[in-house]
Structures are given as C-alpha cells and as structure tokens.
Image (tube, rainbow, N blue to C red):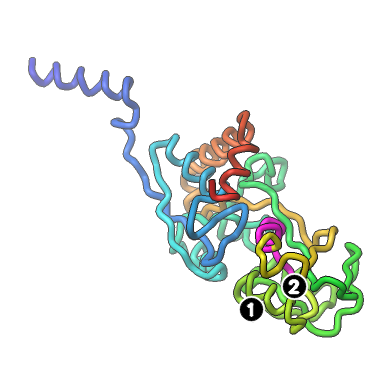
C-alpha cells in the first residue's frame, strides 16, 4: 500500500512539476575571449547569451560557459570538446562537424541569435573608402579581429592584404587614432559602443556600407544533433519564440547596454 501511494505521488509530481521528472542537462558552450556583440560579453549577459540560457532553462537545462579564443571554440566543436558555440555564422565549410537551424536547405535567420555586421572604420579625414564592392586608397594591410574566418575569406576574395595580429577593437582604434594603420574591420555594435568613448569621439568614423552582414547562430556539435535531432530543434525553436515575443527588441537593447 505504501509503495502504491509513493508511486502515485511521483506520478502526480511528474505532471504538476515536470522538472522533477526530467534529468537536467548541462550544455558545454564556448564563447570567445573578447566581447562579441550582440552574441556574448565577458562582464555581463549579451542578447545571444540571454537567448541561449532561456531556451535551455525552458527545457530544464543550463549552459556551462567556457571562454576561449574564437579559433579554439570552433576547433572545440570539431573535436567535440564543446557541445555548442555562440555566434557562429553559416559557413558551409563548418557543416561537416556542426549543425545550425535549417529551413529549405539554408540556415534559418528566424532562429538565429540575431544579425550583425562587420564595418570599416577609419581615422576621420582619411582617404580610405569602401563602396560596397572595393576598397580605395589603402596603403597597407587592413586590420581585422583575430581569428574571424569570414572576414579573412571576404578580404581574400577581394584581393585585399589583411592582418589579424591586433587582438581587440579598442587596440585597433587606438592605432587608428595615431594613424598607425589605415583602416580596421570591427563589428557594428562594438564600433558604436567604442565611438562613444571620449578617447575616440570626433577622431574616428564608421563607413556606411558593411563589409559583411550575417546572422549568428547557436551552433551545436553535429554528432549530438544527429543522435538527438529533436533536442537540437527544440532549443532552436525556443530561441525563435523568445525573439518573436513582444518586447524582445527593448530587452535586447538593454542587454547590449549592460542594463
């Protein structure tokens, strides 16, 4: 009788409190070791981290973050060191070892972590220009953030010499202020934040046309999604639902500002 009663209590609990009946899972998630707006920040939660955390929590799971250089994050998906990486662009060269939310054979922007763009920044008054198709008046290699493959590939296709030896956007901008470099490629959200700082106000400018515009995704290691496709789809679907909810634009802006 006692056993039957206990069994009934557990069955009722599984209906009333589903979390008690579900084994919580921790997902190993890698983020880059530099702020990567709007996907990840080191000091506070970015919109992308918010989306991932809430999507997992709705399934009674949680992210466990590892901070590493971007190249190591991507390589960690290849070697299955990490379960997921935040902010990965759709790149067919990655599809052998990671999965993204797809629709009609293409990455689905409705279930991305948001859009972003890499912009061209120059010192104010510089003759360097970018018309959306080609650069002009570049005298030396253009600088871009370390390890960003999509930027490297884009510049290579344009035949533009480039270098990624400078680690942070702030460092690149200080070099621009000193006229030590001609131009730098920086993410739009980070550029807008940096240009508000007193040391850069009135000294730098962001050109209007993006070098690259893309959507960043929660990329999940392919073997996990091959084994548990419903699990991966459920996470991406939750991300899409949160983004489409009323008030998301305001929440995202507050997160970007660290509020």
| Residue 133 location (% of width, % of height) | 90, 65
- The crowding category of the residue bearing disc 2, from other C-alpha atoms within 10 Å (few below 14, some 14 to 19, many at least 20), is many
**Residue bearing the label numbered 1:** 166
Q: Marks 1/2: CA distance?
A: 10 Å
* Residue 248 sits above or below residue 35 on the image: above
Nearer to me, 44 or 23:
44
| Mark carried by residue 231 | none
- The crowding category of the residue bearing disc 1, from other C-alpha atoms within 10 Å (few below 14, some 14 to 19, many at least 20), is some
| Residue 199 location (% of width, % of height) | 67, 70
User: Residue at image x 38%, y 37%?
Assistant: 60
Marks 1 and 2 close (CB-CB < 8 Å): yes
Lower sequence index among marks 1 and 2: 1
Q: What stretch is highlighted in magenta?
A: 184-194
User: Residue at image x 20%, y 17%?
Assistant: 8
* Residue 51 sits above or below residue 68 on the image: above
Nearer to me, 109 or 243:
243
Q: In this view, does 115 lie to the left or right of 77?
A: right
User: Residue at image x 77%, y 70%?
Assistant: 203
| Mark carried by residue 184 | 2
* Residue 23 sits above or below residue 34 on the image: above
Q: Is residue 93 left or right of residue 226?
A: right
């Amino acid at each position: 009788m006692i056993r039957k009663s206990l069994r009934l209590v557990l069955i009722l609990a599984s209906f009333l409190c589903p979390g008690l009946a579900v084994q919580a899972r921790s997902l190993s998630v890698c983020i880059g070791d530099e702020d990567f707006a709007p996907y990840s920040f080191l000091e506070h939660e970015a919109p992308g981290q918010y989306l991932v955390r809430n999507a997992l929590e709705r399934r009674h799971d949680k992210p466990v973050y590892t901070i590493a250089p971007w190249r190591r994050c991507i390589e960690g998906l290849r070697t299955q060191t990490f379960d997921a990486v935040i902010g990965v662009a759709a790149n067919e060269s990655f599809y052998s070892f990671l999965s993204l939310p797809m629709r009609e054979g293409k990455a689905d922007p409705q279930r991305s972590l948001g859009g972003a763009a890499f912009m061209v920044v120059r010192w104010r008054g510089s003759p360097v220009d970018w018309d959306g198709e080609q650069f002009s008046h570049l005298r030396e290699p253009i600088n871009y953030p370390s390890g960003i493959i999509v930027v490297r590939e884009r510049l290579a296709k344009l035949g533009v010499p480039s270098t990624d030896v400078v680690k942070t956007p702030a460092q690149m901008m200080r070099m621009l202020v000193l006229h030590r470099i001609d131009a730098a490629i920086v993410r739009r959200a980070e550029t807008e934040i940096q240009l508000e700082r007193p040391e850069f106000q009135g000294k730098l400018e962001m050109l209007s046309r993006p070098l690259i515009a893309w959507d960043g995704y929660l990329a999940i290691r392919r073997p996990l999604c091959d084994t548990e496709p419903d699990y991966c789809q459920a996470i991406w679907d939750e991300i899409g639902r949160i983004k489409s909810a009323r008030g998301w634009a305001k929440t995202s802006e507050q997160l970007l500002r660290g509020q």
